[in-house]
Amino acid sequence: RAAGTALAAVLCALVGVPDHALAAPGAPGEPRYSPGAADVGDPYFPDQGNGGYDVRHYDIAFAYDPSTKHMDATTTVEAVATQDMDRFDLDFRGPQITSLTVDGHKASFERSGQELIVTPRPKLKSGKDFTVVVKYAGTPPVVTDPDGSIEGWVPTDDGAFVPGEPQGAPAWFPGDDHPTDKATFTFHATVPEGVTAVGNGKLVSKTAAGGHTTFVWDEKEPMATYLATVTLGNFTVAQSATPSGIPVYTAVDPRLADRSAAAVSKIPDIVEYFSTIFGPYPFSSVGAIVDQAPDVGYALESQTKPIFSSAPSVGTMAHELAHQWYGDSVSVGRWSDIWLNEGFATYASWLWTEHTGGATAQQTFDSAGNYGRAATSSFWQTVTADPGPEDMFGNVPYNRGAMTLHALRGKIGDAVFFKLIKDWATTHRHGNGRTADFVAAAQQASGQDLTRFFDVWLYQKGKPATW
Ligand code: ARG
Ligand code: ZN
């Protein structure tokens, strides 16, 4: 079109037709179709997310055989166009695509890195709901992160461990992979008889047929893609409820039953305690998946079902459950805000320790390894509010982040501090928040000028000496 327009412009200039008469594609008010952006512009993961649409719901149906590692999948993405669009991207690193339709019409597509570039015909008008159905088959990949850890689809000796933070979700389903585009999810997992599939939200049905079992899981509350999981394995399942009546579903690898019993049995109490300080639990179910995935070596706060790659301590359980408020319900707007997840969850575990008769939060703040680290320690050389993709799950967002909250509590007083963090969970419930929003909320709540405070704790390198 560009070449044709340029040629037309030359011809029109020759015969004296005014320029604006050429304006493509037509009269005012007519759609001006353009491609949706290929990413959201998050510098930590420059390919993540996409523009031009909002996802409303994912329906992910797959059959997986742990012995061959073969997946056969159909993912349906229901979205709404936010611009007149003739092309859009999904994030996808999964196996070979065998068919792709938009609103039932076969659409042409290309793949380039994690971008799945789709050309829908007819084109999509702004405000239009549309449905993309992608069928694919093969072995989903393990994804390696900037810090060297692995995520995505990680096969285990009896199934698969499936963590997605910060960029693992596109390993097993196509989507808009950035925490700013939340959606509801339904999963249909078909696995060989004897394997249990555990997903986010609630178990809707479990149907056996021909040596296979299909588990349907439904998450009705908005969820960021990185928090999606369907983890597969040999699990002992138990169901109970918190004192407030939130259903609890736990799935534990029998090899880890003894070592994880203390942490798993505390789930109702931890959720209840956090509800008193952070406000009502933000989802309609809770639980945990304890699996043996030795190559992973970390836990993840998958929504409603944190996943543990080994037997968790009570402290780790408290950390992942605190993330349900801070991380899952209130999610980061950009990955550089990660201390809002990790600092809050770490501080919550300090509060749990104090609540259960262990070290006080002040003692944890002071003790060696935290504020006690020498000013010369490399620990103080990372900026809390911008640690970089390699250190986003390192010591600083966790411990310096938690120390920031404890220091803030000392500065503004318990009453203002606890109201602030509860209000933060309420204001941004099922949404996103950024560091600058939190700083502004703290200023507002306290009536104090906290510029220097946040400068030394969040935005500068070096050990804060006074604040
Ligand atoms: N958010 C997780 C936790 O602290 C850690 C995820 C680590 N992921 C990674 N790719 N290193 O509970
Ligand atoms: Zn965490």
Image (cartoon, rainbow, N blue to C red):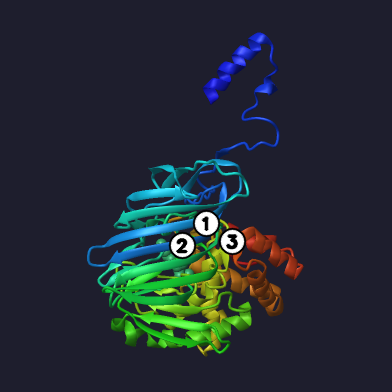
- Camera-nearest residue between 88 and 43: 88
- Camera-nearest residue between 310 and 280: 280
Q: What residue appears at the point 44 percent right and 49 percent down from the top-left corner?
A: 101
Residue 241's spot in the image, x, y percent? 51, 87
Residue under label 3: 458
Residue under label 2: 59
Residue 434's spot in the image, x, y percent? 61, 59
Q: Give the residue type that dot 3 points to.
A: Leu
Label 1 or label 2, whichever comes before in sequence order: 2
* Callouts 1 and 2 close, C-beta under 8 Å: yes
Label 1 or label 3, whichever comes before in sequence order: 1
Query: From the viewer's perspective, is the residue at label 1 or at label 3 nearer?
Result: 1
**Residue density around tag 2, few if under 14, some if 14–19, many if 20 or more, within 10 Å:** some
Label 3 SS:
helix
**Residue density around tag 1, few if under 14, some if 14–19, many if 20 or more, within 10 Å:** many
Label 1 SS:
strand
Residue under label 1: 78
- Which numbered circle lies on residue 363? none
Quadrant housing residue 73: bottom left
- Camera-nearest residue between 155 and 108: 108
